[in-house]
Image (tube, helix red, strand yellow):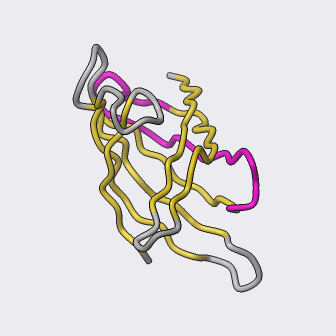
């Protein structure tokens, strides 16, 4: 199991405007392939819409597009449901490995 607390930005660059931070954990949940189970909260503290978005689901790292479930939120995202579509932008394998991920959210209220 690994925990994380990473910046959330408007774009994939580290110089992009900060929106907040992502906090959560993931664990390896397969003996035969690199599959991770994620549970995390996107804590949005900047911009016009502030609040949290709760996301969870299983991701196969070999899939070019991954779909996670949005199960709730607070503030501007109160009662949100939907899908978090995830793609890998970049990975730096130098320990500790750093992933740059892109998320497109399709939210329903």
Query: Residue 82 in the image: x percent, y percent?
Result: 58, 33
Residue closer to the observer: 101 or 83: 101
- Extent of the magenta region: 61-80
Residue pushed farthest top? 48
Q: Identify the residue at horizontal 52%, vertical 40% (top origin).
A: 70
Picture quarter containing residue 105?
Answer: top right
Residue closer to the observer: 49 or 76: 49
Query: Residue 31 in the image: x percent, y percent?
Result: 71, 85
Q: How many numbered marks, from 0 up?
A: 0
Query: Residue 96 in the image: x percent, y percent?
Result: 40, 71
Q: Identify the residue at horizontal 76%, vertical 54% (top origin).
A: 63
Q: Is residue 32 above or below residue 82?
A: below
Q: Is residue 96 above or below residue 86?
A: below
Q: Is residue 70 magenta?
A: yes
Query: Residue 104 in the image: x percent, y percent?
Result: 57, 31
Q: Is residue 3 magenta?
A: no
Q: Identify the residue at horizontal 47%, vertical 35% (top origin).
A: 12
Q: Is residue 55 above or below residue 46?
A: below
Residue 101 lies left or right of residue 14; in this view the side is right
């Amino acid at each position: 199991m690994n925990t994380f607390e990473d910046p959330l930005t408007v774009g994939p660059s580290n110089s992009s405007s900060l929106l907040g931070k992502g906090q959560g954990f993931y664990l390896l949940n397969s003996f035969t392939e690199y599959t991770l189970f994620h549970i995390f909260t996107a804590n949005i503290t900047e911009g016009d819409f502030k609040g949290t978005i709760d996301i969870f689901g299983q991701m196969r790292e070999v899939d070019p597009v991954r779909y996670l479930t949005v199960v709730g939120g607070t503030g501007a995202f109160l009662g949100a449901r939907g899908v978090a579509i995830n793609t890998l932008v970049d990975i730096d394998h130098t320990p500790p490995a750093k992933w740059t991920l892109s998320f497109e959210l399709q939210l329903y209220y």
